[in-house]
Amino acid sequence: MKFIYADAMDFVDPEFDFENDRNAEGRVIQRDDQYPHEFLDRAPYDGILISRGVVGDVHRNGKYTLPQVMRFRREGARRFLRYGDDKYPGSLLFGDCGSFTYRDEKLPPYTPADTLEFYADGGFTHGCSIDHIIFDFDSGEGRKRGDLPQEILDRYDVTLDLASEFYSQSKRLRHFTPMGVIQGWSAPSMGWAAQQLVRMGYEYLAVGGLVPLKVPQIHSALSAIREAIPGNVRLHLLGFGKIENLAEFEKYGVASFDTTSPLLRAFKDAHKNYFSRDVNGVLSYYTAIRIPQARENNKLKSKARRGLLHQETALGLEVAALEAVRSNVKGNMGIEPALDRILEYWKALNWRESHDEAKQLRALTKQREIYRRTLGDRPWERCTCRVCREGGVEVLLFRSSNRNKRRGMHNLHVFYQHLLAHRHAA
Ligand SMILES: [Zn+2]
């Protein structure tokens, strides 16, 4: 299974100064920053997926600024991402419309013609047809067409109509593989959509709408799709976050999947922030130690406004916590006194006088155990990636985008190693 990483302008400043929490002087965003494939010793994925919705255009905002959109369209994705074919031979460039960004609209805002233009300008190797998300998913056989609200039927039909038009128009692009997107309200309806797409001529199908589905629902959807189409038709899983379950879906002939999950978990997951792989090849996770910048923290600012905590006190606790981590790692402070300081700051952030004290004390004890494992195990010392080599314990701190995204890149590295090991074993 090929791992396609879905980028949303996630990069780091390679010259970031951890000691002073500062970017390099004169650094220009994106231009002087590095994507995971640039920062790490080797690209931690087989390809990159770029969504039209993330790029944006003059009519609709994405994550790119307008000058970046123009440069992306002019230079193409390879140059913009500095992900050239020469440097990354065999790498793939997938495009989709990012249907989540227009989920609330009656119709997709794009046409097959302008989408193909976007794919052509970008130099994509693979591009998805335009789809419209269906959110309701019935388990089992599901509702029949006649029992469905009109809106679901419309979304289903428009996805197939646009796919048909997209396929015929895609013939004018060279070195390009069109992918037909499957949307459905149940496993059988997804199987039927897959069959329609194959009839149109598609040889590569992308399964959409997976994000809210539970593992058993994904099994039933994929099994219905696989049964409905010939064995040589390849499948791609769009926005597939259940990376721990990947291996069990391989049997459906899944050729590729895209996700941002390893990167996002670094700063969105409550506990699984740092990936680690043990000698037996089992993935485990560490929790990053939260030492946010006091000056920019909303919880602390609100406490200061209400007169509950002086900003100077908060700043003092922040500095003490940071120093405690660094001293402990250098061997100048024991783990328990270091944890005392880290948790003093945690308390400043999380403690509420008005809340149940016993409950909060239990949370504090639990947090201490979690942080003791992170600091005690020193997982960064076992990792050889550039993030851990250069950043050390800084990478285990939940603090500022440069640390958080570096940790995300480390996770991509570990996840890709995990995937490669699985591939070799298979
Ligand atoms: Zn690492």
Image (cartoon, grey):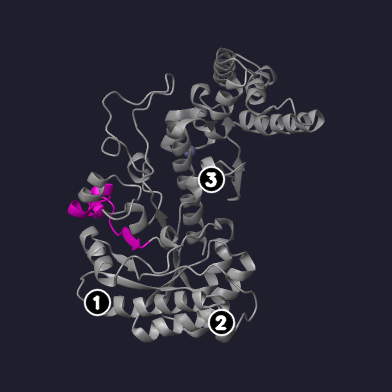
- Magenta segment includes 74: yes
Above or below, 124 relative to 229: above
Viewer-closest of 145 and 245: 145
CB at disc 3 and ligand 1 closer than 8 Å:
no
User: Label 1 is placed on what type of residue?
Assistant: Gln
The residue nearer to you, when weighing 340 against 46, is 340
Tell which tag, 2 or 3, sits nearer the viewer: 2
Residue 384 visible, this orientation: no
The reply, left or right, for residue 149 in relation to residue 388 is right
Observer able to see residue 28: yes
Q: Which residue is mark 2?
A: 188
Residue position for label 3: 265
N-term-proximal mark, 3 vs 1: 1
Residue under pointer 1: 169
- Decide if residue 23 is on the left or right side of residue 266: left
381 drawn magenta: no
- Please say if the residues under marks 2 and 1 sit with CB atoms less than 8 Å apart: no
Query: Over which residues does the magenta segment extend?
Result: 72-97
The residue lying at 68 percent from left, 34 percent from top is 370
